[in-house]
Amino acid sequence: MKLLITRVMPDPVAARATAGFDADLRAENTPLSAEELRVALRDYDVVMPTLRDAFSAQVFADVPAPRARLLANFGVGFNHIDVAAAQAAGVAVTNTPGAVTDATADTAMTLLLMSARRAAEGERIVRANAWDGWHPTQMLGQHVTGKRLGVVGMGRIGQAIARRGHYGFGMSVGYVARSDKDLPYPAKRFANIEALAAEVDFLVIAVPGGAETHHLIGAPVFEAMPDHSHLINIARGDVMDEAALIVALETGQIGGAGLDVYEFEPEVPAALKALDTVTLLPHLGTATLEVRTAMGHMALDNLEAFRDGKPLPNAV
């Protein structure tokens, strides 16, 4: 069975793929080009794509009878794949949930702490030899322990973030979700995001990407937030109205932000880079060797199940 892997993978993943498939391992770390997307559907039985490999409805329309029968996505988010168009073309889609939960939640807490305590700004000052020594009012930030945490989206990752906030930092937890959650710690469900935003010190976004959540977080949410509060996004960049966030930060409408994802990544607006009140990470949510290897093995579990005629473990 002929397999295309669209990015460079950790060595154990690459070795397993080449042992089990007639595998082409692409040597580039850039997204598939328009032609490469179509070649993937035409010339391969199965494909392991990832973020920004844009298998759109148009790509499927251009390859009306694809040879490919499975897109085994490397990653939990799959909004770069038009799932309806794939399924209409007879192409199944899987993802890698679970493997990314703890690493992404850790990144959320990293950003929360960095934003609250002005860590990135302080690091820049030290590197620029601009630190003039400790004093009682030096770089005063926000305390985290005992504060109010709001989580938008209480799936696996949202619950892992809330658990860290509650047990690790004694934070009270509020959330917005489609239904009540049975949680092992106290948590209050709010009717809408604006109501939640008005009552928290830190608002963390942990919803899937896609049309339903595009610009879910925008000016009304920032207007509701207290002016000392911080916004953390580890979801997808286009969940956030980036222009509205910039205005909220520039005007002091909110106290700060920590971002791991961007609306048009890898492009990051100059206005965001210019602000000391925002911490910027280069999409590091799952960037540990252990997690990326586990993600690759989970994708291969899906590929091997398909090859062997078994049910797909993580069908979308």
Image (cartoon, rainbow, N blue to C red):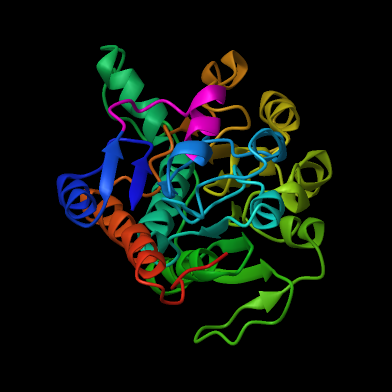
Q: Quadrant of residue 170?
A: bottom left
Residue 233, located in which quarter of the rendered image? top right
Report whether residue 260 is seen: no
Quadrant containing the C terminus in the rendered view: bottom right
Per the rendered image, the range of residues in magenta is 26-40
Q: Residue at x 41, y 63 (%)?
A: 101
Q: Is residue 139 magenta?
A: no
Compared to 74, does 138 lie above or below? above
From the top left corner, tell me how far across and down residue 106 is, in percent: 37, 56
The verdict on residue 33 being magenta is: yes
Instruction: Tell me if 163 is positioned left or right of 8 in this view.
Output: right
Residue at 26% over, 47% down: 22
Residue 131 place in picture, x, y as percent? 29, 18
Taking the image as shown, residue 263 lies to the left or right of residue 282, namely: right
Pick the residue in front: 73 or 188: 73
Please name whichever residue, 223 or 240, is drawn nearer the observer in this view of the structure: 240
Residue 181 x %, y %? 63, 82
Identify the residue shown where x is 48% and y is 44%. 116
**In the image, is 9 to the left or to the right of 31?**
left
Depth order, front residue of 188/265: 265
Instruction: Identify the residue shown where x is 68% and y is 44%.
Output: 239
- How far across and down, in percent of the image, does residue 13 sit? 22, 51
Above or below: residue 258 compared with residue 171: above
Is residue 285 among what the camera can see? yes
